[in-house]
């Protein structure tokens, strides 16, 4: 179900060079200890193996809330900082709108509504990302639930037009991702290789996850034009990894290795290091498994403590938002292993946390998610926070 477009030769050539160079439910309890990931794990653009010693993040870190950047947001889901360093784009799941937030003043400007979005349950306007060529093309990519499927579109952002009319007509880049009342995935991010990575859910249909012909329960890897990216593990397929239940977060470390967060069912939520072609086991496995054919998570949590959503990598650690867990998790890294027990911050202070984005200089942007029908909204919800972390 791919919308075929002519590939950009320079971009594909660059990707090929990079490839050649390296390549929720219930429950309770504390997070399990770190587990080693399989040997030789790397993203397509990262070195295979390790010729140099891996840095180890300190066992303990810190979090300081610097300020509340913006308040009064409705069901915020996707978050994309603009290159100017002082502006954020925020997607509203249920209103199907994208809003510009001035991170210096908190002022909000409506860009416009995305047509064709059909919000229901966990579906709606979900992840957003800026084009790798945003400086020249000013394109915003968005993942949303339509009446028939989940799909990815791109839209021109024209700040010279009046507020509410600054989004161009959506151009469908990729479609046919299964939709459901639950488990719609929705996170999109451009990787260090310039390719578009997409986290999908199995829409409540478990059998889709390990079916490599299905787009549900996967991480997909696409060109910006919506084609299967060069070097994908399965010929002519957008599938990059499979056996996922509901991928919610995507982020890379400084060696271009991909990590992903994933909702479990009744027992274990997961943080995974992603290997091209890896099988992460759902529905046969939830959390760690004795089956050597499945990739085990770096860390697993009882679902009351996590129900993870967005992730970011900063200061040598993965930072993971918890929805039901209502906390921010820090997972210190040594390569693709968790080097110490995870730490929890902000527990219960701001309610459900949805999206985490690295802001540089040891800072994070974090959005709350208390207006999504499962939270307990307070005055000012939902909001964007700025954090200093170490």
Image (cartoon, helix red, strand yellow):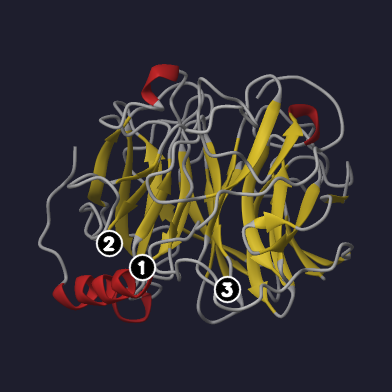
Tags 3 and 2 in contact by the CB under 8 Å rule? no
Sequence order check, earlier mark of 3 and 2: 2
Residue drawn where x is 74% and y is 28% of the image: 303
| Corner quadrant of residue 62 | bottom right
Sequence order check, earlier mark of 1 and 2: 1
**Quarter of the N terminus within the rendering:** top left
Q: Which mark is residue 131?
A: 1
Q: Which element type, helix, strand or loop, lies under badge 1?
A: loop
Residue placed most toward the observer, 282 or 100:
282
Residue placed most toward the observer, 366 or 14:
14
Q: Which element type, helix, strand or loop, lies under badge 2?
A: loop
Residue placed most toward the observer, 105 or 276:
276
Residue drawn where x is 87% and y is 65% of the image: 61
Q: Residue 224 carries which label?
A: 2
The alpha-carbon separation of the residues under discs 3 and 2 comes to: 22 Å
**Quarter of the C terminus within the rendering:** bottom right
Tags 1 and 2 in contact by the CB under 8 Å rule? yes
User: Label 3, on which residue?
Assistant: 254
Sequence order check, earlier mark of 1 and 3: 1
């Amino acid at each position: 179900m791919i919308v075929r477009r002519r590939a950009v030769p320079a971009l594909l050539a660059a990707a090929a060079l990079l490839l050649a160079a390296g390549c929720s439910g219930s429950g309770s309890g504390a997070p399990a200890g770190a587990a080693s990931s399989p040997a030789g794990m790397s993203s397509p653009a990262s070195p295979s193996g390790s010729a140099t010693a891996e840095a180890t993040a300190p066992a303990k870190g810190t979090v300081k809330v610097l300020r509340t950047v913006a308040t009064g947001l409705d069901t915020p889901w996707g978050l994309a900082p603009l290159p100017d360093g002082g502006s954020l784009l925020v997607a509203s799941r249920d209103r199907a709108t994208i809003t510009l937030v001035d991170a210096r003043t908190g002022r909000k400007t409506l860009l416009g509504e995305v047509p064709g979005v059909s919000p229901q349950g966990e579906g709606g306007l979900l992840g957003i990302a800026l084009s790798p060529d945003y400086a020249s093309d000013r394109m915003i990519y968005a993942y949303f639930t339509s009446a028939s499927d989940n799909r990815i579109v791109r839209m021109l952002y024209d700040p010279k037009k009046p507020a509410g009319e600054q989004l161009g007509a959506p151009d469908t880049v990729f479609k046919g991702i299964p939709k459901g009342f639950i488990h719609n995935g929705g996170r999109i991010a451009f990787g260090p290789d310039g390719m578009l990575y997409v986290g999908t859910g199995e829409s409540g249909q478990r059998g889709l996850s390990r079916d490599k012909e299905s787009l549900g329960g996967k991480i997909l890897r696409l060109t910006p034009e919506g084609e299967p990216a060069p070097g994908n593990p399965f010929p002519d397929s957008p599938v990059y990894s499979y056996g996922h239940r509901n991928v919610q977060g995507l982020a890379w470390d400084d060696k271009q290795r991909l990590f992903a967060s994933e909702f479990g069912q009744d027992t274990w939520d997961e943080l995974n290091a992603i290997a091209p072609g890896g099988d992460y086991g759902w529905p046969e496995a939830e959390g760690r498994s004795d089956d050597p054919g499945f990739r085990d998570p770096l860390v697993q949590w009882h679902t009351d403590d996590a129900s993870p959503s967005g992730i970011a990598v900063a200061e040598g650690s993965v930072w993971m938002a918890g929805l039901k867990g209502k906390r921010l998790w820090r997972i210190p890294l040594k390569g693709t292993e968790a080097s110490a027990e995870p730490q929890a911050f902000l527990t219960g202070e701001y309610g459900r946390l949805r999206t985490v984005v690295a802001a540089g200089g040891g800072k994070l942007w974090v959005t709350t998610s208390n207006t999504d029908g499962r939270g307990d909204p307070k005055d000012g919800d939902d909001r964007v926070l700025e954090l200093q972390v170490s």
